[in-house]
Image (cartoon, rainbow, N blue to C red):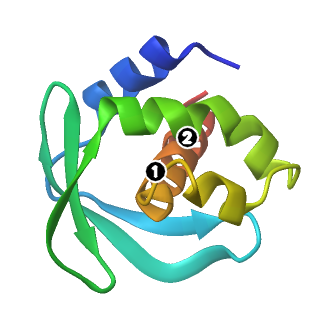
Amino acid sequence: MAGFNEVWSEIQTHLTKGAEIPNWGYEEGYTGNVTLIVGKYYDVIEVTGGRTVKPRDVTRPDFKKVYEVWDRYKQGLTSREEIQQISRNTTYIFSILRWLETSQGAQS
């Protein structure tokens, strides 16, 4: 597992404003919905999607908390409900992390 700072750097490098990231979760896979990247800043990714009417800021510390349990979550060892206790932005974070892993895998 890459360190969080490396992952955040990859997100900052490869994620672009206006990108539509397919939503993904361990239990349901790809949902058919998307996360729209509204803005990208040093410590914040601004997103919208689904029922979110106005853009929501997903902060670097929020990403870090979820990333610390990401490997366990994607193996089905930690439930979404548990992770939602540490972040209300799990849909966006899971989707962006999954996008980063699959887009990098496709480039390798």
Left or right, 62 with respect to 23, comes to left
Q: Which mark is residue 16?
A: none
**Marks 2 and 1, the one that precedes in the sequence:** 2
Left or right, 92 with respect to 17, comes to right
Question: Which quarter of the figure is the C terminus placed in?
Answer: top right
Task: Please state the horizontal and vertical placement of residue 46, each as a whole percent of the image.
Answer: 18, 52
Residue at image x 51%, y 19%? 4
Q: Is residue 75 shown above or below 80? A: above
Task: Please state the horizontal and vertical placement of residue 43, each as a whole percent of the image.
Answer: 21, 28
Residue at image x 15%, y 59%? 18
Q: Which of marks 2 and 1 is in front?
A: 2
Residue at image x 57%, y 13%? 3
For marks 2 and 1, give the CA distance. Answer: 7 Å
Q: What residue type is labelled 2?
A: Val
Asked if the residues shown at circle 2 and circle 1 are in contact, with their CB atoms under 8 angstroms apart, the answer is yes
Q: In which quarter of the image is residue 55?
A: bottom left
Residue 104 visible? The answer is no
Residue 62 visible? The answer is yes
Residue at image x 49%, y 69%? 23
Binning the other alpha carbons within 10 Å of mark 2 as few (below 14), some (14 to 19) or many (20 upward) gives many
Residue ranking furthest to the front: 85
Q: Which mark is residue 66?
A: 2
**Callout 2: helix, strand or loop?**
helix
Question: Which quarter of the figure is the N terminus placed in?
Answer: top right
Left or right, 102 with respect to 53, comes to right
Q: Which amino acid does label 1 sit on?
A: Ile
Q: Which of 2 and 59 is in front in this view?
A: 59
Residue on which the image places disc 1: 93
